[in-house]
Each structure stands twice: as structure tokens, then as C-alpha cells.
Image: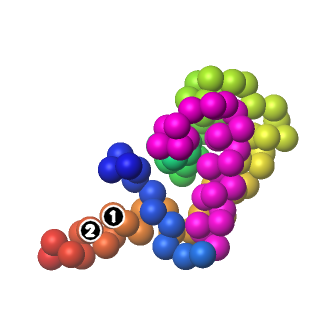
């Protein structure tokens, strides 16, 4: 799973990311766990990208999942993404370790 960008740093963010993984798994169906995790990572990357707005974000996530999320599902996913407070912290750690 080297292609996973996000690594939760607290129990709270791990639980939130696990919820995102569950939503992704429910929409992808019967695929290997590694695929679910990398897809959840990609979904979170779009959710956290401030350069992509509203409906464009939803279209990208729908495309990744291969389904059209209902508004309630989408809003729940967005809310979970907002609760991830340590996204990008890995980049900070990598930069500090090379200094």
C-alpha cells in the first residue's frame, strides 16, 4: 500500500478515515481491500483539494467510485472529510526529516 498518501495520526482521524473507507467499500463492491484503501485515499485527496469546488469535486468522486452519490451520501462524505484535521501533516514530517 505504498501508494497511500494519507496516514491518520490520531485515533479520532483513524476512525473518521475508517468511515470513509466503509463508504467507499460499499460503493465499490467486491474488490480487494488495497483497492478500497487507495480509492478512499484518492477520494480524501479530492475532498481536501481547495482548488476544486463543489460540483466538480462531486463529479470527480463519482467518477472514482463509478457511481453517482445521492446528495445525503455526498454531504456525509464531505462532512467526514472536513473532520480530517491532520491531512497534509505527513508532508510536514517529511520536510522536517530532510532538513
Foreground residue among 45 and 34: 34
- Whether residue 4 is visible here, answered yes or no, is yes
Mark 1 touches mark 2? (CB < 8 Å): yes
Residue appearing at x 61%, y 58% in the figure? 17
Tag 2 residue: 94
Q: Position of residue 79 (x, y in %)?
A: 73, 55
Image quadrant containing the C terminus: bottom left
Tag 1 residue: 91
Please tell me whether mark 2 sits on a helix, a strand or a loop: helix
Residue appearing at x 66%, y 62% in the figure? 16
Taking the view exactly as shown, the residue that stands out farthest to the right is: 72
Please tell me whether mark 1 sits on a helix, a strand or a loop: helix
The answer to whether residue 29 is magenta is yes
- Relative placement, left or right, of 38 versus 69 is left
Q: Residues within 10 Å of mark 2 (few under 14, many from 20)?
A: few
- Relative placement, left or right, of 45 versus 77 is left
Residue appearing at x 65%, y 66% in the figure? 15
Q: Residues within 10 Å of mark 1 (few under 14, many from 20)?
A: few
Query: What residue span does the magenta drawing correspond to?
Result: 12-36
Residue appearing at x 75%, y 31% in the figure? 69
| Quadrant of residue 59 within the rendered picture | top right
Q: Position of residue 42 (x, y in %)?
A: 49, 42
The answer to whether residue 52 is magenta is no
Q: Marks 1 and 2, Cα distance to the nearest angstrom?
A: 5 Å
Amino acid at each position: 500500500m505504498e501508494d497511500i498518501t494519507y496516514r491518520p495520526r490520531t485515533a479520532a482521524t483513524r476512525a473518521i478515515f475508517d468511515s470513509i473507507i466503509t463508504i467507499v467499500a460499499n460503493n465499490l463492491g467486491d474488490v480487494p481491500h488495497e483497492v478500497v484503501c487507495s480509492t478512499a485515499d484518492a477520494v480524501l485527496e479530492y475532498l481536501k483539494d481547495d482548488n476544486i469546488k463543489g460540483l466538480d469535486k462531486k463529479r470527480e468522486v463519482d467518477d472514482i467510485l463509478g457511481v453517482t452519490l445521492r446528495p445525503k451520501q455526498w454531504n456525509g462524505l464531505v462532512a467526514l472529510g472536513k473532520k480530517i484535521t491532520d491531512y497534509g501533516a505527513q508532508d510536514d514530517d517529511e520536510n522536517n526529516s530532510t532538513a
